[in-house]
Amino acid sequence: SSRSTEPQNFPPGPQPVPIFGNLLHLSLENPLKDLEKLSKCYGKVFSLYIGGRPAVIVNGFEAMKEALVTKAVDFAGRPQDLMVNHALQGKSFILSDYGSEWREQRRFALMTLRNFGLGKQCMEERILEEISHVTVSLEKSAGKTMDPQTMFHKSAFNILFLVLTGSRYDYEDKILEYFISLFNENAKIANGPWAMLYDTLPILKTLPLPFQKAFKNIESGKQIAVDLVDEVKKSRHPWKPRNFIDSYLDEIEKRGNVGSTFNEDQLIFYIMDLQFAGTDTTSNTLLTAFLYLMTNPKIQERCQQEIDMVLDGKEHTSFEDRHRMPYTQAVIHEVQRIASIVPLSVFHRTTRDTELMGYSIPKGTLIIPNLTSVLHEEGQWKFPHEFNPLNFLNQQGEFEKPEAFMPFSAGPRMCLGEGLARMELFLVIVTLLRRFRFVWPEGAGEPDYTPMFGITMSPKPFKMGVRLRLN
Ligand code: HEM
């Protein structure tokens, strides 16, 4: 890891040391602040060595857009040799490299999500049905204080699970709690210090360090997914798909064995991918939303006024209502901006020799898209560093989304679940704010907004005061 051997015109960065590279420049607990400092020093596009491996960090809207949108294909690959790849045995869809296999699997999932009602009423009904279970459990806490730590994870889990299998778990079910603990652990391990050490010093691979836990969790998850597919098969009627698993099994048969990338092994990992991608992200966004709504009662009240006015007498909200709720829409987007739930996206890799902001980047280079740097960038936002819905409202009070809003990333690898996630966030937040007022519990001290770092950021645990609204 020496800069003297790197290609001409490679993005600059700090001098690496042997073995560790630039790892010692980063706080392994939360490297985001360090990346910000390095970007001030070296510019929007700079490089770091993770052990002996060079990585290019992309910061700010202009560079991000050039990489992910303008030069989309050049930057649409994924590294294949990190801890996460090993843990998922090279079979994860999310981590699959750019190419026809990835494209076919992605197209299939998007089409299947649409067939099962995304953008249609039936998905909405399913989500609203799930929210009614959240409402019931919150009603039990009316007038009291409750711990929301797992509630939103459970509802997000179930919504995805319904799409995949057609069934859901009761919130009291121990199995559901077990699944969620698996996800939580892995989201923290995968981008955390132990994963970085693994990627830096492969010699540690076999030692009994915390990343072994991630490997074990994936084995457990895999077994669960295998059982699940068997269960769904029992009541399946070919060519009459009821859910994602049915559709995938149909697709396997349709394509046959020759040259097809569709097989049951792939399905098992797809299930794990989607369930993971859809649970931790949405639920941590919701936790962040209620943390800010509770501690900004004026903002909460203004949403409630708007919601009451628009829904006046309607039994429940629908996603269409968002067009008449500019303020609430602004608040939800502002939550996503401030939360920056997937701070460093999923790592990319260049698919060919290319250029970025005038620098040369060879094929196969690890690319880290720093989405947080875009969501908090000075010059792109009216109030980059504070929670303020005005970031998404124009002079007339209309909802307006700046181009730098990219919590789902951008370009061909952009989040596949964006539609589902946006629908979920809107329906949950509007339904709950209509029925309840959320208050920061007395004696809970000053709120701590500093999130915990991982593939997904999560707020520090907090309690929620729940009051029934009279309507
Ligand atoms: C608030 C919620 C969510 C956020 C903020 C979010 C964010 C992201 C981000 C930043 C990426 C990486 C994109 C890239 O590599 O450039 C991603 C990828 C992905 N997300 Fe999401 N996501 C959310 C919810 C969901 C849901 C609900 C699903 C499930 C349907 C999902 C499925 C995926 C998949 C499959 C990928 C990989 C796409 C690919 O590699 O082609 N996400 N997401």
Image (cartoon, rainbow, N blue to C red):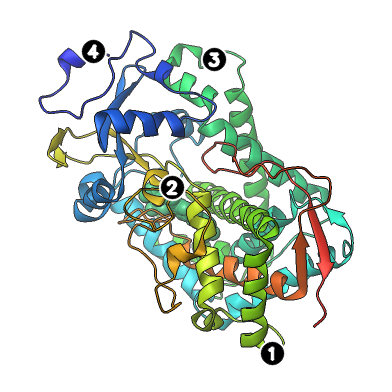
Residue under circle 4?
Answer: 2
Q: Looking at the picture, tell me which residue is in the foreground, 47 or 235.
A: 47
Q: Nearer the viewer, mark 1 or mark 2?
A: 1
Amino acid residing under circle 4: Ser
Amino acid residing under circle 2: Ile
Q: Position of residue 159 (x, y in %)?
A: 64, 64
Q: Position of residue 188 (x, y in %)?
A: 59, 35
Residue 360 visible within the image: yes
Quarter occupied by the N terminus:
top left
Q: Position of residue 152 (x, y in %)?
A: 69, 56
Q: Looking at the picture, tell me which residue is in the foreground, 17 or 218.
A: 17
Mark 3 lies on a secondary structure that is loop
Residue under circle 3?
Answer: 206
Q: Residues within 10 Å of mark 2 (few under 14, many from 20)?
A: some
Q: Nearer the viewer, mark 3 or mark 4?
A: 4
Q: Earlier in the sequence, mark 3 or mark 1?
A: 3
In whole angstroms, how far apart are the C-alphas of marks 3 and 1?
Answer: 59 Å
In whole angstroms, how far apart are the C-alphas of marks 2 and 3?
Answer: 25 Å
Residue under circle 1?
Answer: 314
What mark, if any, has residue 94 been given in the picture?
Answer: 2
What mark, if any, has residue 293 been given in the picture?
Answer: none
Q: Residues within 10 Å of mark 3 (few under 14, many from 20)?
A: few
Q: Earlier in the sequence, mark 1 or mark 2?
A: 2
In whole angstroms, how far apart are the C-alphas of marks 4 and 1?
Answer: 65 Å
Q: Is residue 396 above or below residue 146?
A: below
* Residue extending farthest left: 8
Mark 2 lies on a secondary structure that is loop
* Residue extending farthest bottom: 313
Q: Looking at the picture, tell me which residue is in the foreground, 397 or 249.
A: 397
